[in-house]
Every structure is written in structure tokens, then in C-alpha cells.
Amino acid sequence: MKAIVHEGKAGMAGLSLREMEVGQPGQGEVRVKLKTAGMNHRDLFVLHRHKPTDPPLIIGSDGAGIIDAVGEGVTSVSIGDEVIINPGLGWMEKSDAPPEGFDIVGLPGHGTFAEYIVIPAENAIPRPEHLIWEEAGVFGLSALTGYRALFTRGKITPDMTILLPGVGSGVITFILKFAKTVGATVYVTSRSEEKRQRALELGADKAIDSDGDWNEQLSGEKVDLVIESVGAATFSKSLGQLRPGGTIVTFGASAGDEINLDLRSFFYGQYNMLGTTMGSAEEFKEMIEFVKKHKIKPEIEAIFPLSKYEIAFNRLEEAEQFGKVGFLID
């Protein structure tokens, strides 16, 4: 089968489209003939976490397709079922943090940027009927991350005002849609006027310039909840917009891992800071039900054939997209 594989060199220099052996499902596993796959910023990080001396690795965490083989003991799904992949491995029930041994599809095991993938049967979830293949394939990781950040950790309620710095990523666009579906007031930031306009079209109540004075642009208004994924570049500004006793949930650090924190201001403000990443199988199923009930779809920036992987990875690295970038596989 054709697959986007990383080997031999760090970063994008180690990527190639090559032939790989089609896997066979074992006990409790299924094989999915993939129709579409979705990119995440994790795919860029994997190109450095996967060492040049490691065996060849198929990249990718998100995908959707049709089950074409089942292993021994599988009864939950059948050949011919149309499924979306839950990329979280080994985290079954909702909990404060993932259990030991939790992994994500695409490292250390093979990922979704290929014609076939073998996964545990429990990770093959029926495709929501309102999602076409391109939408289903870019859904799992971002929607799950956003769902846990907003509902499990952020405990969103309709009367809350939330701030989403750096609108445009797959996760943040999902959070924007989820929060507006609940009925919350949502403010977003971006350096891009085009992204701010698109966020307003999706229902954001205010969209401000990330490079400007946030307090001034929001007329001094403070928010109940900030969901922060940018990192060092915006964290202090995000904290500055939080009301006393408010909560900041962080799941990313695309613009720097380390921050300077005024600890005295933090404890005087009675703030809550929570970390989150991905989510459990229980939360994935809750998220799918929420998405089905409200007919929520992802925003898609571009879909490429596997052969155009270099363009796709460069698009993701430039971080100029609004929504998801993915692959059409068949």
C-alpha cells in the first residue's frame, strides 16, 4: 500500500511516499481501508520525536474509512462498516488524566496517512451520517481535544463568556462551534483580519487583534474562561483578561513552552489553571453524540492527495490555515 512514511532524517527531510506492507488484524483488531485522513500539529512534532534511527513510521492520527477485515473475537463492528477513528489508545473512561500506557495513533504505532490501518476494534466508531468522508477524516483528534477542554475541564455553561486566543486551528474552531451551540458568549483573537472575519461568520461575538491591547479592545470586560493553545506569545495577555476566580485551560504551546508568571497576582486573583490533552473513549463517544445531535461539521482549509504531502505539511507548518488540512486517499 502507499503511505506517507518518516525515516532516516529528522523533520520533513525524512518524509516520503513509499510502499509499505498492508497489516493484518490480530485478536480484537480491525483493518480499515482509509478514504480520508486529517492533519494535526502533532504530525509536525512527530517528525522530530520519531528518531532517524527508529524503524520507518507511517505518520497521521486522524482518519475515516470502511472496515475490510476483522480479527478474532471482534463483535462490535463488521466488514463493510463505515467508521471514524478515535486516535486515543488505551484511555477508556473519563478521568483526571490518561492512564499509564496511553498512546495516540501515529506514534509509536503506524498512523493514518496510508491506504490501510490496523487499529483496536474499540477505536472504530460509526461515522456520523451528516459528515461526508472529507469531514469525517479530519475530525477525531481536534474535536476530542476541544470537547474535553471545553466540557470536562472548562465546565462550560450557557451563561459563561469565554476567550479563544489564536482562532484558526482545528481545535479552536471546534471549540468555537461547540461553545456557541451551548449558548455561551465567545470572543476570539487573531493577527489575521481574514481569520477574525471568518470567526465572526461562524458565530463569534467579538474578534480582536492578537497584536493589539486586548483589554482596550474588549473595553475592560473580563471573561469566565480562557482556552489557551498558543503558549508564551499570548499566555500573559490571556491571564490578564480573566475575571477573579476564573479558569484558564491550556492544551498547547505552539508559540513557546515557557512563560513568566506573576505568582502573587495569580493567587490574589484566585485563578484556576488546568492542563488538558486529548480525551478518553467515553468523551469521544459523548463528543460524537453532541456533534450528531447538533449537526456540527469541521471547517476544512484544503484536501490533498497523498502525493501532494509536501504541500500539505508546508501548509500546516505555516499555520495560516483556518480549520483542517487533510488527505483524500482513494
Image (cartoon, rainbow, N blue to C red):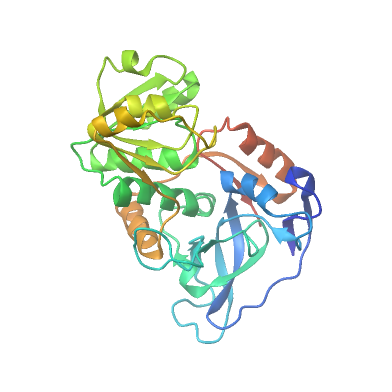
294 to 53, vertically: above or below: above
Residue 314: quadrant of the picture: top right
Q: Is residue 54 left or right of residue 277?
A: right
Q: Can I make out residue 203 in this image?
A: no
Front one among 207 and 80? 207
231 to 190, vertically: above or below: below
Quarter of the picture holding the C terminus: bottom right
Residue shown at 40%/53% (left/top)? 130
Q: Can I make out residue 169 in this image?
A: yes
Residue 191 x/y as whole percent:
49, 21
251 to 199, vertically: above or below: below
Residue 266 x/y as whole percent:
31, 32
Residue shown at 36%/59% (left/top)? 283
Residue shown at 45%/29% (left/top)? 260
Q: Is residue 276 left or right of residue 219?
A: right
Front one among 21 and 35? 21
